[in-house]
Image (tube, rainbow, N blue to C red):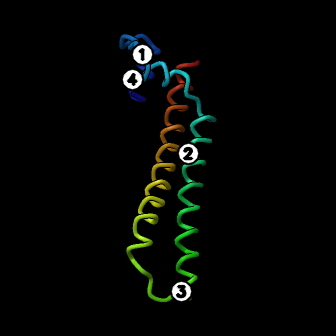
């Protein structure tokens, strides 16, 4: 969808009509970066919670069953947040050329 944005603005591809394409037209860099930061903060809070539970056992053996799922979710959230931020920068770079 990001790849279609510039050619459709220049008239090389027909504009698609639909909810997803209307949403893509309304997205901007600031909104996506705020969303990405929120996702990264949620993931960071999960990592911090896992670290605190590890510190509760004096940094010794950790029960894998209680930490694996939250830590997996948290690291995935951090990765998704970084990907959203990078996609937002790419989308804003594509829009710079279209605005001139």
Q: Quadrant location of residue 62?
A: bottom left
Residue denoted by label 4: 4
Alpha-carbon span between mark 2 and mark 1: 26 Å
Alpha-carbon span between mark 3 and mark 4: 52 Å
| Disc on the earlier residue, 3 or 4 | 4
User: Disc 3 on helix, strand or loop?
Assistant: loop
| Disc on the earlier residue, 1 or 3 | 1
Q: Which mark is residue 8?
A: 1
Q: Residues within 10 Å of mark 1 (few under 14, many from 20)?
A: some
Q: Which residue is drawn at the image coordinates 49% and 43% (left, top)?
A: 84
Say if mark 1 contacts mark 3, CB within 8 Å: no
Question: Which one is in front in this view, the residue at disc 1 or the one at disc 3?
Answer: 3
Say if mark 1 contacts mark 4, CB within 8 Å: yes
Q: Which residue is drawn at the image coordinates 49% and 36% (left, top)?
A: 90
Q: Residues within 10 Å of mark 4 (few under 14, many from 20)?
A: some
| Disc on the earlier residue, 2 or 3 | 2
Residue denoted by label 2: 36
Question: Which one is in front in this view, the residue at disc 3 or the one at disc 4?
Answer: 3
* Figure check: 29 above or below 73: above
* Figure check: 32 above or below 60: above
Q: Position of residue 57 (x, y in %)?
A: 53, 86
Residue denoted by label 3: 57
Q: Position of residue 80 (x, y in %)?
A: 46, 49
Alpha-carbon span between mark 1 and mark 3: 57 Å
| Disc on the earlier residue, 4 or 2 | 4
């Amino acid at each position: 969808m990001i790849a279609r944005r510039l050619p459709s603005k220049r008239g090389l591809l027909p504009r698609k009509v639909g909810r997803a394409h209307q949403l893509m037209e309304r997205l901007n860099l600031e909104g996506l970066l705020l969303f990405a930061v929120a996702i990264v903060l949620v993931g960071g809070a999960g990592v911090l919670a896992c670290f605190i539970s590890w510190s509760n056992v004096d940094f010794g053996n950790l029960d894998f069953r209680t930490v694996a799922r939250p830590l997996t979710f948290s690291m995935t959230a951090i990765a998704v947040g970084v990907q959203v931020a990078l996609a937002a920068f790419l989308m804003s770079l594509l829009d710079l050329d279209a605005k001139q």
